[in-house]
Image: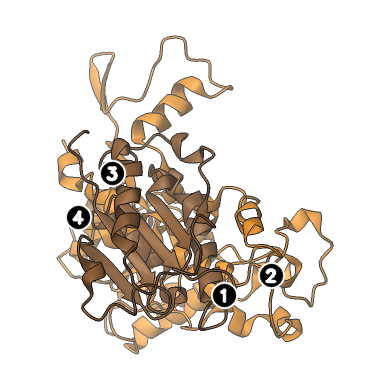
Amino acid sequence: MENFNPRIVCFSCKFGWGYLDPHKDSLKGVTHWVPVACSGKIDAAHILEAFSKGADGVLVLVCPEGDCHLQDGNFKTEAKVFLLQRILPSWGLDSRRLRVIAAMNPDGEKIPALVRDLAAQIAHLGPARLFADSPAAGQEAEPAAVRGSFSASW
Amino acid sequence: MAQKPKVAITWLGACGGCDMAVVDLDAGLLDVADRLDIVLWPVALDFKYKDVEALADCSLALAIISGCVRNDEHLEIARLLRQKAGLVLALGACACFGGTPGLANFSSRQAILDFVYRDSPTVENPEGTIPQEKSLVNGHTLTLPAFHEKVRALRQVIAVDYFLPGCPPPPQLISQAINAVLAGDLPPKGSALAPRRALCDVCPRNRKKPARLEITQIRQIHEVETDPDYCFLEEGILCMGPATRSGCGETCISNNMPCRGCFGPVAGVEDAGTKHLSALASILRTEQYFDLAQLVDTIPDPAGFFYRFTQPVSILGKAALKMHPLDKERP
């Protein structure tokens, strides 16, 4: 799997991620980027649809706690992601293929790095194929969400 | 006197509950039998498949088919009735969405055979005998239908005109459906012959629902003494009502059992599981964000819970079926 480059779909909140980037330079290096107005709009079905259409990993970028422009869309989407992480192993998909990050990056400069980071972390799992990942692997003590590793002041 | 419309009622991979729901029409069944000519009903009457094969194509007014499609016999009968019937009604959750048998799609065919005939604690099978499609007994070849890799809903093998979900569907809706066919008073093809709204809209417990629903602790029905007038979700009991089609007659709800989702998603929704999941995600509440992951961990068998009746027709369920094309499975 050394040369395997996972396809990552990145959903992000427009209010917290990349809105200050007039030329969308932050898009560079991100092939499948879906910015939406409030992460609460990201449906669980969109995430599963991404997997069914060939995504190897899905990255969901939401605003930090208390910073949702529309009250609590970030909280709802995090809950959706946590629930999806619990059902993915039943489909034979490792739950590490789905990651949510609660932070803020108006410039969007961090987005390509975060996508690359997820790709690097799941590269050893190989392409996402239903019922191909070991069911136990998804249950490892991987943190369900990454938070606090960088501040909201970017 | 004009000839009575011909109807076939049959079961594929089913428990027979849907047929019992037809029997539950009670005296109404006599009326149905009076107005219709039943040409096939394996549960109740003695007809042979060859009698159906002898009929002209499209000579049946209606074929009512319950159950999922898991083996070659199911497939053959479904295709035969599609050929002979003008209208096909998928009756019950199994025919409409795959139903509870569809949960078998979380396993493989091999894993199922291994467990049922070898690994189950109650199995004594030292010779490792497993069912064969062909076996020789006293010089005669006996055959069994081929067991497919995956469970399919009826619409995934033949064109289905109307859907009547439920586990089982209530007799009243069956009666309405038959009358609608007889009167020619039918909605556009592809419709479900059931209300379009969600169960919460008609739930008798909805009257005492708080303005803002919040679940801080997930509990099972046997852990709580519920007030029969209060919303289950308010007490932390997972109920599928927000994302399930109404029309069932609220039998579970009025017997103090939360909705399990047998009527499938409301009109226009493709993946029932994700809608249940999103509805639940929107009412989970914890003091700290960190506690959210722990809270969702208390849901037993989440995939089985969200996809209890709809696994084969869900987004990933359909993708999994594509990995096992039907025609390649057939000998």
Who comes first in sequence, dot 1 or dot 4?
Answer: 4
Give the foreground label among 3 and 4.
3
Give the foreground label among 1 and 4.
1
Q: Quadrant of the C terminus of chain B?
A: top left
Image spot of residue A73 (x, y percent)? 51, 76
Amino acid at circle 2 = Leu
> Is the same chain shared between marks 3 and 4?
no
3D distance between C-alphas at marks 3 and 1: 31 Å
Query: Residue B242, labelled with which disc?
Result: 1
Name the quadrant containing residue B84. bottom left
Q: Is residue B202 left or right of residue A78?
A: right
> Is the same chain shared between marks 2 and 4?
yes
Who comes first in sequence, dot 2 or dot 4?
Answer: 4
Amino acid at circle 1 = Pro
Viewer-proximal residue among B325 and B53: B325
Q: Is residue B27 left or right of residue B210?
A: left
Circle 1: is it few (<14), some (14-19), or many (20+) Cα within 10 Å?
Answer: many
Amino acid at circle 4 = Glu
Is residue B237 visible in the rendered image? The answer is yes
Q: Name the residue under label 3.
A: A129
Q: Residue sitting at 35 percent across and 35 percent down?
A: B109
Q: Colour of chain B?
A: orange
Is residue B40 visible in the rendered image? The answer is no
Q: Name the residue under label 4.
A: B53
Give the foreground label among 3 and 1.
3
Query: Residue A14, labelled with which disc?
Result: none
3D distance between C-alphas at marks 2 and 4: 50 Å
Q: Mark 2 points at which residue?
A: B233
> Is the same chain shared between marks 1 and 2?
yes
> Please, what secondary structure does the residue beneath circle 4 have?
helix
Badge 1 sits on which subunit? B
> Mark 1 near mark 2, Cβ–Cβ under 8 Å?
yes
